[in-house]
Image: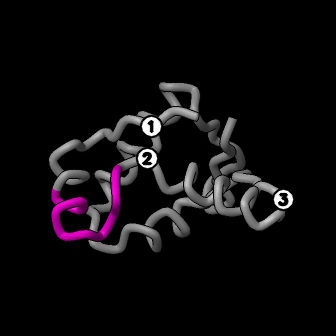
């Protein structure tokens, strides 16, 4: 599995330096590896709402998060579904 690039390398580096993250993009690979090691099924990364994404990154500006989601859409990593307050993003 590959390590996903970050949209904001400066932010990712800062998070790494303060030990908030190990390396950008490695967490999901670690989770999958740990599940395999414990004989558990791999997690399914299916969908996320804008609010859930904001809750995951409470200190990040909403506009930055919106740009992140749009970049993931453009990179065909996620697709946008639903309308208005019912919008969610599905991983491809």
Name the residue rendered at 33%, 40% in the picture: 6
Name the residue rendered at 46%, 73% in the picture: 55
Instruction: Please determine whether, in this image, residue 76 is positioned above or below residue 55.
Output: above
Instruction: Please determine whether, in this image, residue 9 is positioned above or below residue 74.
Output: below
Determine which quarter of the picture holds residue 35. Answer: bottom right
Residue 80: percent from the left, percent from the top?
A: 63, 41
Gap between marks 1 and 3, in whole Å? 22 Å
Determine which quarter of the picture holds residue 49. Answer: bottom right
Q: Mark 2 or 3 closer to N-term?
A: 2
Name the residue rendered at 71%, 49% in the picture: 82
Of the residues tagged 2 and 3, which is closer to the observer? 3
Of the residues tagged 1 and 3, which is closer to the observer? 3
Residue highlighted by disc 3: 41
Magenta-colored stretch includes residue 82: no
Residue highlighted by disc 2: 25
Gap between marks 2 and 3, in whole Å? 21 Å
Residue highlighted by disc 1: 4
Q: Secondary structure at mark 3?
A: loop
Q: Which mark is residue 13?
A: none
Tell me the crowding category of disc 1: few under 14, some 14 to 19, or many 20 or more residues within 10 angstroms, Cα based.
few
Tell me the crowding category of disc 2: few under 14, some 14 to 19, or many 20 or more residues within 10 angstroms, Cα based.
some
Picture quarter with the C terminus: top right
Residue range highlighted in magenta: 14-23
Q: Secondary structure at mark 2?
A: loop
Instruction: Please determine whether, in this image, residue 71 is positioned above or below residue 36.
Output: above
């Amino acid at each position: 599995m590959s390590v996903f690039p970050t949209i904001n390398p400066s932010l990712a580096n800062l998070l790494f330096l303060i030990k908030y993250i190990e390396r950008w993009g490695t967490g999901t690979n670690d989770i999958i590896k740990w599940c395999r090691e414990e004989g558990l099924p791999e997690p399914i990364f299916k969908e996320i709402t804008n609010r859930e994404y904001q809750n995951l990154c409470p200190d990040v500006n909403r506009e930055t998060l919106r740009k992140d989601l749009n970049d993931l859409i453009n990179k065909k990593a996620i697709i946008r579904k639903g309308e208005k307050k019912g919008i969610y993003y599905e991983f491809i």
